């Protein structure tokens, strides 16, 4: 594919007049009226002298009240950080709120790095809040995506003022905990950079070169500037910019996508050229296995979120601590609350009734921990997950749910599993007649195109048959099911593969095939074969050698109903969601050409390729009152 050096006109960072007035208007509509509330704009210094742009919304009346805080890399002040229903309830109850920009974002000083100094900066802010005459010393954290990722490390390390948190879609805050080694804030999947997601996010959200406030000690001057201007990038709003980026992300080399856009430098330029276990990944304030503490948390995410697997593993890692909860919805990134509906859709796929009392639960949670109201909290199951395809919530007191057991489906074919019309099968037992191996090409100049799945994809769930119609996709399916199968928990693909190049990628996709043939994506994962043994020690592939690779990173709760089929796709690319492999074994982010790889999937008795999953064996009953015990 030819390199495309055309550029969007990125312009410069813009200063927008009057946005803070919108914030103040919006919070008045939530009950924080001017006669009851003050809005203060501060540059709050932390331990190393860096000043963080901070907005305090507090009652005028004397007294000490609970505080709910949001920390974010996005525009600040901005009313969308206070969009959760809990803030309206808190303002009507006379509580306070704090919204703060991470260092290096908005008007906050310092260079940006992914969740950089997040735990220390949050801890210093918590200490400051606890010492204010309007604070009762009890602070709760809430937020989705980056605002959730900001919570994880400080919650694990602990702070006397931090009493409870509600992290939603927090997967990029998860580092090397059990099961997530080498994902590094979701930048990778199986060692493969998640290209389209992070090229879109790092600019405009994580630039290293940007405007800043003057070094002034005059608090009035700083407040006037912060009230008057908001710093942002035109890339966050300009449709032409996004169309240009969507085009350039498909060009090579992938490490220079943002450079070709002509935008300010970002961490993307660094991360694309390091390995998943490079020391540079110790700089972000991710939560790692060494962070063994926990603050009470309600972890909320959706099954089609980019970090669904990491959210589940986070809960699994911390569930032995008191007051840890997991809610997994039928939604994509940060859409859990707004997507709840009596007749919900997840992309193109009907979900049924997904209603859930999120707002009541969150408000009761904070009343319990921030305001000393234990009776406000109604006990609920530790785990509540929506079973897609059945329209039901499943509950339990731990994860994996105790009513699950590992089962397997074995891959088979007559040697022609290529495409939707091939002879690939999934069966509960090996079939000696289905032993011939399947060969599939992977051409980096003509990669398999991403359908749905990606962060921000519309729709996130859609019919996968256009991909399955390609001759470079292997398709393995069960016969139509006589009775339903509920997969609830982790899903692994154990494949025996050989290739004819020094390196290649293997992608898998779990698909629910409806009786009419519509094939909805459920989960996906992949592995770059150089990382088949270890993320820390990439090892070249010996062409022709058969390797057993376990592809982890998928989790779900999906009911494959009677008449449906369980399907596994196998391919050598999923582009541009994931960076393509040029099959040389070299520095992939700098390459522009490479050979077609031939990937062979073996499934004979010596090489039992299979799909392993947690099958739910409990009863699937109608829900009486989701959200409560």
Image: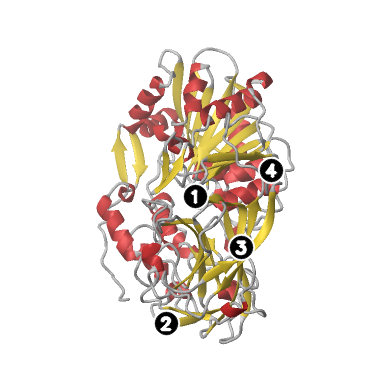
Sequence-wise, the earlier of marks 1 and 4 is 4
Q: Do the residues labelled 2 and 3 touch (CB within 8 Å)?
A: no
Residue 174 position within the rendered picture, expressed as x and y whole percent measured from the top left: 60, 51
Sequence-wise, the earlier of marks 1 and 2 is 1
Badge 4 element: helix
Q: Of the numbered discs in the image, which one, if any, rests on residue 492?
A: 3
Task: Name the residue tied to disc 2.
Answer: 594
Task: Name the residue tied to disc 1.
Answer: 305
Task: Name the residue tied to disc 4.
Answer: 157
Pair 2/3: label in front: 3
Q: Are marks 2 and 4 in contact (CB under 8 Å)?
A: no
Badge 3 element: strand
Image-quadrant location for residue 218: top left
Quadrant (top left, top right, bottom left, bottom right) of the C terminus: top right
Viewer can see residue 178: no
Sequence-wise, the earlier of marks 2 and 4 is 4
Separation of residues labelled 1 and 2 (CA atoms): 32 Å
């Amino acid at each position: 594919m030819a390199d495309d050096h055309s550029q969007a006109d990125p312009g410069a960072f813009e200063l927008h007049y009057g946005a803070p007035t919108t914030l103040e208007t919006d919070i008045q509509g939530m009950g924080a009226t001017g006669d009851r509330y003050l809005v203060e704009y501060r540059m709050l210094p932390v331990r190393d002298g860096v000043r963080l742009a901070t907005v305090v919304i507090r009652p005028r009346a004397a007294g000490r009240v609970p505080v709910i805080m949001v920390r974010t890399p996005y525009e600040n002040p901005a009313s969308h950080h206070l969009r959760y229903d809990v803030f309206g309830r808190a303002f009507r109850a006379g509580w306070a709120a704090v919204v703060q920009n991470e260092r290096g974002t908005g008007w906050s000083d310092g260079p940006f790095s992914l969740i950089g100094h997040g735990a220390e900066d949050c801890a210093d802010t918590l200490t400051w809040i606890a010492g204010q005459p309007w604070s009762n010393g009890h602070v709760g954290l809430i937020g989705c995506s980056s605002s959730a990722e900001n919570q994880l490390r400080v919650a694990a390390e602990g702070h006397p003022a931090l009493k409870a948190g509600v992290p939603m879609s927090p997967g990029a805050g998860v580092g090397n905990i059990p099961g997530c080694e080498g994902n590094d804030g979701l930048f990778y999947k199986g060692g493969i950079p998640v290209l389209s997601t992070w090229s879109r996010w790092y600019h405009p959200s994580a630039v290293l070169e940007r405007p800043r406030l003057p070094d002034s000690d005059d608090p009035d001057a700083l407040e006037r500037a912060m009230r008057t201007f908001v710093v942002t990038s035109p890339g966050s709003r300009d449709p032409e910019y996004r169309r240009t980026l969507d085009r350039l992300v498909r060009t090579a080399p992938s490490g220079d996508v943002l450079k070709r856009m002509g935008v300010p430098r970002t961490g993307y330029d660094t991360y694309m050229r390091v390995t998943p276990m490079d020391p540079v990944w110790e700089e972000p304030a991710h939560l790692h296995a060494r962070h063994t503490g926990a603050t009470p948390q309600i972890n909320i995410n959706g099954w089609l979120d980019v970090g669904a697997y990491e959210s589940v593993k986070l809960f699994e890692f911390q569930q032995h601590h008191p007051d840890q909860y997991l809610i997994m919805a039928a939604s994509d990134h940060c859409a859990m609350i707004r997507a709840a509906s009596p007749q919900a859709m997840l992309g193109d796929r009907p979900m049924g009734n997904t209603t859930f009392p999120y707002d009541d639960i969150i408000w009761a949670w904070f009343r319990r921990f921030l305001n000393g109201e234990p009776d406000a909290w109604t006990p609920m199951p530790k785990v509540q997950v929506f079973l897609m395809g059945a329209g039901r919530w499943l509950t339990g007191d731990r994860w994996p749910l105790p009513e699950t057991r590992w089962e397997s489906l074995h891959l088979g074919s007559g040697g022609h599993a290529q495409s939707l019309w091939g002879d690939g099968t999934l069966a509960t037992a090996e079939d000696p007649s289905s032993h011939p191996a399947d060969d599939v090409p992977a051409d980096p100049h003509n990669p398999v195109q991403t359908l749905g799945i990606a962060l921000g994809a519309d729709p996130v769930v859609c019919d996968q048959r256009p991909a399955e119609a390609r001759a470079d996709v292997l398709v393995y399916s069960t016969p139509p099911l006589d009775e339903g199968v509920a997969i609830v928990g982790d899903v692994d693909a154990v494949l025996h593969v050989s290739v004819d190049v020094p390196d290649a990628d293997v992608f898998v996709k779990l698909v629910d095939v409806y009786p009419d043939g519509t094939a909805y994506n459920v989960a996906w994962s992949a592995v770059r074969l150089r990382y088949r043994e270890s993320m820390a020690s990439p090892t070249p592939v010996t062409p022709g050698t058969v390797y057993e690779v376990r592809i982890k990173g998928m989790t779900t709760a999906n009911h494959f109903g009677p008449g449906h089929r369980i399907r596994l796709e196998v391919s050598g690319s999923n582009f541009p969601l994931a960076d393509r492999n040029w099959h040389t074994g070299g520095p992939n982010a700098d390459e522009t050409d490479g050979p077609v790889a031939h990937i062979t999937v073996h499934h004979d008795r010596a090489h039992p390729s299979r799909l392993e999953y947690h099958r739910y064996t409990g009863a699937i009953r109608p829900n009486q009152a989701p959200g409560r015990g």
